[in-house]
Amino acid sequence: FDDNAARSKSVYQVVTDRFALTDPSASRTCDTDDKVYCGGTWKGTEEKLDYIHGMGFDTVWISPVVQNINVTNNKLGEAYHGYWTQDINEINSHFGSEADLKSLVDTAHKKGMYIMVDVVVNHVATTQAGSFTADSTYGPLNVTTRDFHSFCWVQDYTNQTQVEVCWLGDENVALADVNTEEASVVSTFNTWIKNLVATYGFDAIRIDTVKHVRQNFWPDFVSAAGVHAVGEVLDGDPAYIAAYQNNSINSVFNYPLYYALDAAFNSTSKSLSQVVTALNSNKQQFKDTTLLGNFISNHDNPRFESHVADKALIKNAVATIYGVEGIPYVYYGQEQGYTGGADPANREALWLSGYEESKDMYTYFTTMNTIRSAANNASSTYNTNQATIIGQDDHNLVIRKDPVISIVTNRGSKAATSSMSITNTGFTSATELTDVISCTAYTTDSQGAFTASIKSGLPAIFLPTSQKGSLCGNVSA
Ligand code: ABC
Ligand code: CA
């Protein structure tokens, strides 16, 4: 799909090795501290597409698929995450065969779902930091002096030249930095991505380590891919990230909002004003905030649940990424209540959960995605509308993104019931509304306003009752 179609998508991120085994009834221990392959495969992911679709996600972001170095390092383990590229022209046989990968994409398409593949350009991996010599095992990148930047570590992240031409990784596994200034390397990658997308029928790509490659490398790469691309520019500064959206990749992950949400919803004593500050500065810096990838967890950061136990806070953080403009990205395991901390602890095997579809958060994501599609069905501009904050105090935000109004709060599950007068709703008088979280009906007054009730510290999300679809069944005021 293209950028425009991407706006209506809802993405579920898996770590292929940890998401599902080929035999769905099998189990296998998986100690995240070991950092080794645990056995997840593309076949396993294919078997579990209905589990993902059942929550209303239509797009699945899978780990990088290319062949990785086959090492077991004392400190860093194995390439189970897929980011230790060896040969871009081969696939990672730990995850299955080419036929399995094609089958995953084909089956997804039959179900009306899409596959987003993670891709790495910036580096290949080696255990020989300073003395790395490329050879034929690195596929097309086999001439050391032509295809790689000379060795130096990225040490100073404020020095952009160093960020681009020096190496990531460490003495255990060095990430040999690809010479993306070299014309033959550029054409190798552009041809590769075009073929990769065409061969498997991928619908979108997630690009790794975007800030470590010169900004003007990306536009040709993205157009060669020919599908929607979202870039990882891991930085908290909106101006820094926005430059990538404005100059090279239309969609990037919303790290500024992530940091604000993680800080604001992690306890009942924090102020939500930092979320508003982040949203406002994003609007100033980014050319199109409706194409930002919103998330509250991913494979690089401690799960939100590793430091927040209150379900109400978790649900409000999630409601915020759905309530504002942008494309929601949800990291596998959140629906099962996983709590892993920093990498590698946040990459738990999902088969150990039993894939229970009755879990509270599984149902909650189903609700979130159902609201999103109801709003999409009701309004052709829902995806291109920016959110505005129509009410605000330290612990409550009222987010309006027509035709949905969300109240999010960090008062926590022990909070007493409170009420809030909601004005400037955009609704006309006598409009029947439903809070689709509590299934409570409201009717707007002569000004289009109403008084909302906030219970148990949960979010309240209002849709015109005529547009709520199947949510809450029949409710009446
Ligand atoms: C392994 C171990 C880790 C160990 C590490 C050294 O080695 O598992 O325990 O700590 C893959 C694997 C990792 C593996 C690495 C290295 O490879 O998944 O498990 O770690 O072998 C992407 C991917 C990521 C992937 C790679 C490498 C890149 O999403 O999964 O890792 O292909 C940088 C990169 C970013 C990269 C990230 C892991 O590292 O820019 O692309 N992610 C600052 C810097 C960032 C930097 C970040 C973390 O620190 O500015 O550039 O990201 O090191 C904000 C600031 C930010 C600041 C953050 C922390 O705070 O504004 O600037 O980010 O407030
Ligand atoms: Ca680089």
Image (cartoon, rainbow, N blue to C red):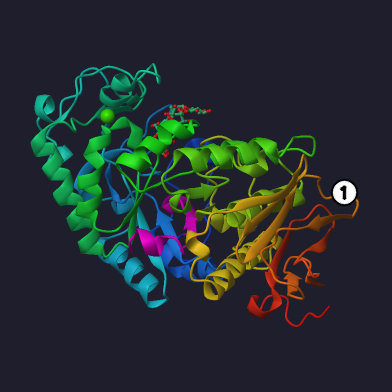
Tell me, yes or no, if residue 167 can be seen here. Answer: yes
Quadrant of the image containing the N terminus: bottom left
Q: Which residue is mark 1?
A: 415
Q: Quadrant of ligand 2?
A: top left
Looking at the image, which is closer to me, 180 or 345? 180
Q: x%, y% of residue 434?
A: 74, 72
Q: Is residue 112 magenta?
A: no
- At 89% across and 55% down in the image, what residue appears? 417
The magenta stretch is 1-20
Looking at the image, is 220 positioned above or below residue 200?
above
Q: Residue at x 69, y 37 (%)?
A: 273
Residue positioned most to the bottom: 474
Quadrant of image for the C terminus: bottom right
Q: Amino acid at mark 1?
A: Ala
Between 76 and 398, the one lying in front of the other is: 398
Tell me the quarter of the picture where residue 231 sits: top left
